[in-house]
Amino acid sequence: MKAATIHQYGANHELHVEEMPKPIVDRIDNPHQVLIRVYAAGINPMDTKARDGSMKLVLSGKFPKVLGGECAGIVEAVGLMVKNLQPGDRVVASLGPEGGGYAEYAVAKDTQVVKLPDAVSFVQAAALPIAAGTALQALLDKGEVRPDDRVLINGATGGVGTFAIQIAKILGAHVTAVCSTEGAALARQLGADQVIDYNAHDFTKGIEKYDLVFDAIGKSSFDDCQNVLKEDGMYITTLPSAKQVLNQAITTFTSKKAESLLFTFKPEQINWLLKQVTDGKLVPVIERTYRLDELAQAHAESETGHVKGKLVVEVESEPKSEKS
């Protein structure tokens, strides 16, 4: 099979397409594994950090590595104990930090795979798990957002942020989006009630108070945002730091809370998100798709920090017969 690999940690030019052995699912020795023929894979900050060595302490030391923490495609084979999936099923999967999605075939655990509704394309699905799952877990699991809550989303037009605007609106919140001048129209299109242009205004110096400040890009801090939190408000970031961990411990005893979030794949939540997409309430914003041999360029674009929505690798065109 073809796969985009790295043979050492480094810059985006370390990504190269090469032939590799196709993975095999041993039905008996690996009874919970699922082999997926990959049609699309999402690109996330986790992938670029895995490539540049920032995550080497939590990754195996084995090279070459195939990155890509999420993918969508068709089940090719399953282990003996896999009961809810079978060859031919359209699926989306989370592959974790070790990845494997930047290839024509990938292996996932059955607990990390869900079936796709026919109405959701592979490209849409590949954009979903990590970014939309992070947004949902921040807003619902951590933030416990309720109707009429005032929610501010920093980084509102990025991969996580574009989902966060829409999910917050589904939950009934009043949404303030913080983004660039260029992103304002997209934020409003996605449902934001107010937009703050960070080039013109510092939202942490504003007078409005929020029930939840969700920093989807890790560019602010609890200390920065205390002034704009209501007395029982919460600050959530996707980029934990030593200071953030300390603040989380301290705010255990205060009314204002500091929280951080690391995405965990929860099948019931992914199914809920897929239903919202099917119902037209949630739209994956995809700025561009790339071929497998364009991954170095895709990583470079991702690392600019200015992508609107998500970037997706289209490994193979979706079969016409599967799209009806």
Image (cartoon, grey):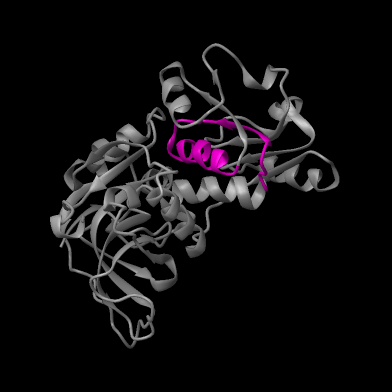
Task: Please report the residue visible at 18 percent of the width from the left and 44 percent of the height from the top.
Answer: 291
* Residue 267 x %, y %: 48, 64
Q: In the displayed image of the protein, which residue is found farthest to the top?
A: 200
Task: Please report the residue visible at 48 percent of the width from the left and 57 percent of the height from the top.
Answer: 272
Which quadrant would the C terminus be assigned to in this image?
bottom left
User: What is the magenta range?
Assistant: 144-171
Task: Please report the residue visible at 38 percent of the width from the left and 42 percent of the height from the top.
Answer: 284
Q: Is residue 195 left or right of residue 260?
A: left
Is 162 part of what is drawn in magenta?
Answer: yes
Q: Is residue 3 above or below residue 166?
A: below
* Residue 194 x %, y %: 57, 22
Q: In the displayed image of the protein, which residue is found farthest to the bottom?
A: 28
Is 287 part of what is drawn in magenta?
Answer: no
Q: Is residue 180 left or right of residue 227?
A: left
Image quadrant of residue 181?
top left
User: Is residue 108 visible to the viewer in this orientation of the structure?
Assistant: yes
